[in-house]
Structure formats: C-alpha cells, structure tokens
Amino acid sequence: MDVTLHLAQDPEADELLGRSPLAALVGMLLDQQVPMEWAFKGPRTIADRMGADDLDAHDIAAQDPEAFAALLSEKPAVHRYPGSMAKRIQQLCQYLVEHYDGNAELVWKGVDDGRELLRRLEDLPGFGKQKAQIFLALLGKQLGVRPKGWREAAGAYGESGSHRSVADITGPESLTKVRAYKQEMKAAAKAAKAKAEKA
C-alpha cells in the first residue's frame, strides 16, 4: 500500500495515510464529530507525539491508557473527544493484535469477496456498518483493494462518480463536492425531523 491520498489536505499526514494501513484505519475511526481533515491528520499527530514514523498496533495496544489519552489531549488535541477516542484507538489496536498479529493490512489482504471484507471491517471496534462501508469504498476506489462484489458491499458509497464520503476525495475540488453533499443530507434530515414534529 503506497498511494497518495488527499484526506487530511496536509502532505505529511496524507503521505502516512497512503502507506500505512493502520494510519488509514485510525483516521477513519477518528472521522466523526470533527472536520474530516482534522480526523485524518490525527494518525500523523499521534505518530509524531510517540516519536515514530508510523503507527504500531502492538505499541499502541500496550500503552498505559491514561498516558495515551494525555498524548491525544495535548494541544492541539487530536479529536474533540480525545479521551474517548484514545480508548477506541487502543481497542482497535488490541483487536488487530489479537486477530491479525497487529498487521492492519491483513484485514483485507487476500480477501476475495466484498461481503466478507465488509463483515471483517464491521467486526473492528468502533466501526459500524456505515463506517465499514465508507472504508470499503475507500479501499476499492483509492487503494486498489477490489475483491469481487466490493461496490455492492459498499452500498451507495461504492458508486462510481459519486461524492458522498472520504472515499471520493482526491483533492480540494472533490472535497468541496463531498462537503456540499453532506450539508444537503443534514438539511434534508433536519427538514424531515421538523416535518415529523409538526405531524
């Protein structure tokens, strides 16, 4: 895995995401309740603060939970909720150590069925169905991981030419389109809620 991603909109952070399967998974895990670029910059920040060039699942899993939470809380914080996200990252790394010998790439390497890959991603701590489908779409669209039926397993996120999620971001222009789509979805959800409350 060695591609150029544009999710953090920061060359160093994106370089790490493009070569480190664990960094990509951690970025995806952090991608909630904060701007996307902030989330995907997180893995680079964590690696820098740990004095490393990459993230290591064994190392993170073995960290003292309080010390690791403090590392994520240093200003600028890695996430709006650094304590709870530190816990989730450690749970993810512990799971990878137990099931994949700490090698994040083994989650998808050699898997030849899209549904099986989706199941494996959904089994990861902190990954619900939507997050798993978005990551599956990212793997297929940008990282060259395309088992049979991957687009179907990724649902709407797997559609070619769509601008729904991080899987579709390849630069500033596509980022703007994804943002616009997300705002439309939020506005539609808000309108539906208001309508339901009036009924």
Image (cartoon, grey):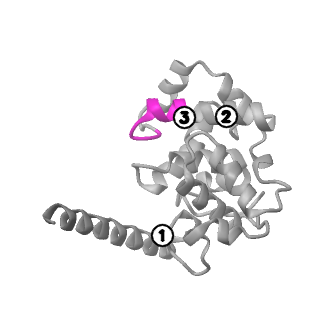
Circle 2 crowding by C-alpha within 10 Å: few under 14, some 14–19, many from 20: many
Q: Nearer the viewer, residue 44 or 26?
A: 26
- Is residue 141 at all visible to an observer of this figure? no
| Left or right, residue 198 beside residue 86 | left
Can you tell which of label 3 and label 1 is closer to the viewer?
3
Q: Is 14 included in the stretch rendered in magenta?
A: no
Q: Which residue is mark 1?
A: 175
Q: Which mark is residue 23?
A: none
Give the amino acid at mark 1: Leu
Q: Which residue is mark 2?
A: 93
**Does 62 appear above or below 114?**
above
Disc 1 element:
helix
Distance between the alpha carbons at the discs numbered 2 and 3: 9 Å
Q: Where's residue 140, x and y in %?
A: 70, 67
Instruction: State the quadrant of the C terminus.
Output: bottom left
Q: Nearer the viewer, residue 71 or 162?
A: 162
Distance between the alpha carbons at the discs numbered 3 and 1: 26 Å
Give the amino acid at mark 2: Cys
Q: Main secondary structure of the magenta part?
A: helix
Q: Where's residue 31, x and y in %?
A: 49, 51
Q: Is 83 included in the stretch rendered in magenta?
A: yes
Give the amino acid at mark 3: Arg
Farthest residue to the front: give it: 199
The stretch of residues the image draws in magenta is 78-87
- Is residue 116 at all visible to an observer of this figure? yes
Q: Which residue is mark 3?
A: 88
